[in-house]
Amino acid sequence: MPNEMNYIDYLRLNKILDAQFPESDNQNKPAHDEMLFIIIHQTYELWFKQLLYEVESVNQIMQKPSLNDNSPELQTVVHRLSRCTTILKVLVHQIDIMETMTPMDFLDFRNMLRPASGFQSWQFKKLEALFGLKYNHRYGQEYYISQLKQEQIDIIKKADSSVISKIGKKIFEKYFVYDTNTYYEFLNKKGEHDWKTLEPRKKTKGRFVKVDVRYNVMINGYDKYGTSDHVELDEKLNITYTIDTNFLPKYVLHNQPDNTIGYSVTLLQAKKLFKKSGIKPINAYIKYDGLKVRYVWRLENIYNEYKDGKGNNGGEMEVLELDAFTGEEVVYIPDIMFGQVY
């Protein structure tokens, strides 16, 4: 007969409850609130473990070639991410318990813990990476990893690259067009950085540092919808910089039809709103406004064109930007000079 399941054994409570060792006791300088401090932070780490468990399961689902908006898989994704939100709320509320410890109570044992710091929580840093905060976007990058062990650094960098390789891989392959502008960076004998394109790589002397692969974005026939970007890999071909796909519209991310207002509708709207008589057909293209986090049709109406004394082309135009989905006016600039007119 197998042993009957026991609550204490199942939860490994003996290990968990015997994992608090106040440093103040070790130094024979008892500080009552250190026990609270330890338990609070151990609880944080347990919740971080659960968050990682949920997020990594979502990443696995998102690796599928396509997901219908009403599919059970996508409902699972929403459910698990909602659970993550609830857990994060609990983590914030734990501060209420921490605040029952006064600053003076904390100072009773703080100096005994140096140089330990919550900044050394590799689980928290891995979560940041999985949620999309890339290493190259961080402030003080060297300090960020300076207090971690190498195996922890490797875990975080692997999570950082998984944002694209897991969630965005299919989107990346479908909408990013290889631009052939691939550069290999070498460090020559003089310590100078030497950039070479793909073909001369074999002939280049020096220590290989990294490769920079350029990509352009092509979506639904729009020319340069969004931006051009690049991927960087280090000398071991590990990803050190990944493309940020935040600018991709939701209909692209969910494999839905393009629901922006059409080109002809945009032109009709512009002709009503422009205030001057143009001398050329209105130039119209769609773009992403990263500052306002929105997509707009940008329309340019050239109403004056001339050359300066040196023969340089220039002129004046009015600019209109319409919300790409509703057609509402969001920006109007009556006079813009363009070209070399001085």
Image (spheres, helix red, strand yellow):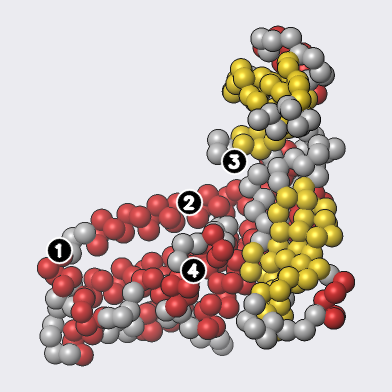
Helix, strand or loop at disc 1? loop
Amino acid type at circle 2 is: Thr
User: Which numbered tag is attached to residue 208?
Assistant: none
**Residue located beneath label 3 in the image:** 290
Residue furthest out toward the front: 309
Q: Residue at x 24, y 71 (%)?
A: 36
Asked whether 139 or 22 is in front, the reply is 139
Amino acid type at circle 3 is: Gly
Q: Name the front one of labels 3 and 1.
A: 3
Helix, strand or loop at disc 4? helix
**Can residue 52 be seen in this snapshot?**
no
From the top left corner, tell me how far across and down residue 48 is, in percent: 46, 66
Mark 2 vs mark 4, CA separation in Å? 27 Å
Choose the circle earlier in sequence order: 1 or 4.
1
Helix, strand or loop at disc 3? loop
**Residue located beneath label 4 in the image:** 141
**Residue located beneath label 1 in the image:** 102
User: Which numbered tag is attached to residue 85?
Assistant: 2
From the top left corner, tell me how far across and down residue 313 is, in percent: 77, 29
Report whether 36 appears left or right of 92.
left
Q: Which residue is drawn at 80% across and 80% down?
A: 204
Choose the circle earlier in sequence order: 3 or 1.
1
Q: Name the front one of labels 1 and 4.
A: 4
Near mark 2 (Cα within 10 A), the count class, few <14, some 14-19 or many ≥20, is few
Asked whether 212 or 191 is in front, the reply is 191
Mark 1 vs mark 2, CA separation in Å? 29 Å
Asked whether 45 or 253 is in front, the reply is 253
